[in-house]
Image: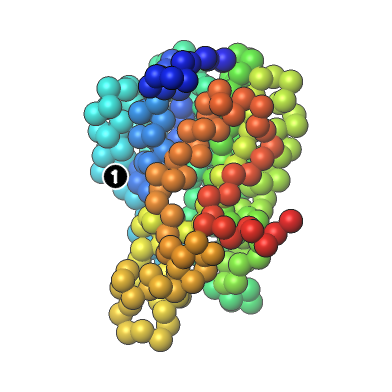
Amino acid sequence: MDRQHDSTGPRPARLIGRTALITGAARGQGRSHAVALAAEGADVVVCDIGDAGGVATVPYALSNGADLDETVRLVEQLGRRCIGLQADVRDTDQVDRAVSVAVDQFGHLDILVANAGICGFGSFWEISDEMWRDMIDVDLTGTFKSMRAAVRPMIDQGAGRIIVTSSMAGRRGSRNLAHYTAAKWGVIGLMKTLALEVAAHGITVNAVCPATVDTPMVHNDAFYGLFAPDIDQPTRETVAPRYASLNPIPVPWVDPADVSNAVVFLASDDARYISGSTVDVNCGSTATMP
């Protein structure tokens, strides 16, 4: 998978001839990753829960089929092929089908971005069994099932890139996010373990750990209320300073494109010897950590 380029001229697209599968790609980070990978030359399979229904304990609206269609449109606008699929990462058969479609339609699967995830909140002692189960099922088990399905054809072809979405909550404790934090720490453990198991097969496995990202996951009444319980009907503008206060680089949210830049790097030959690592797109939040 090596590729050289003339450093004095424009850099060629880094992912020409590659096929990528992105979960949770209907909007937010997943859509941004799909577009960024396509801009580097990859053909893309995108999947999301679509119109199959929500997750009962998630306090905001999930994406729908129209959102997924828009991601497909944006990728195709770049001249790349794109297939959109409804797939719930909690369902083994649906995840396996998404991988099979990628291999059957494009001949190979080179990149997995296991991005699908949900978020919710509550004091540790207020997290119900249902809240815990939903979070672990989607964010941890769904990531495991995606990795398990994708790594099989990658082993057969002797090459691949697996990138999983963790979080800054996977690198430190986070108040009111015990179930989310547990899932995202678990994702890093999965990543490091698989990286060891497939190192001899030409496959790298890494994680991106963003700070709060500017997506619908955080821009909703429920999360605004969490950060501004003292403000009646808080808005994006009124909560922004409170989000910014969490980051050494004082911005409230990371742009999805900044996370996508890290994903593209990890998917490319530039990162061929990076595996088992976390890339923290976090506005300096880990500067005080060893």
Query: What x and y, as percent, mark residue 97?
Result: 48, 28
The structure residue drawn at horizontal position 27% and vertical position 22%, both measured from the top left corner, is 79
Q: Nearer the viewer, residue 35 or 141?
A: 35
Q: Nearer the viewer, residue 232 or 120?
A: 232
Placement of 186 over or under 31, stated as above or below: below
Label 1 sits on a secondary structure element that is: helix
Residue 235, by quadrant, is: bottom left
The structure residue drawn at horizontal position 66% and vertical position 40%, both measured from the top left corner, is 277
Q: Quadrant of the C terminus?
A: bottom right
Placement of 155 over or under 208, stated as above or below: above
Residue carrying label 1: 67
The structure residue drawn at horizontal position 43% and vertical position 63%, both measured from the top left corner, is 251
Q: Quadrant of the N terminus?
A: top right
Mark 1 nearby-residue class (10 Å; few <14, some 14–19, many ≥20) = some
The structure residue drawn at horizontal position 46% and vertical position 39%, both measured from the top left corner, is 261
Q: Is residue 200 left or right of residue 254?
A: right
Q: Is residue 186 left or right of residue 114?
A: right
Is residue 103 among the parts visible in the rendering? no
Is residue 204 among the parts visible in the rendering? yes
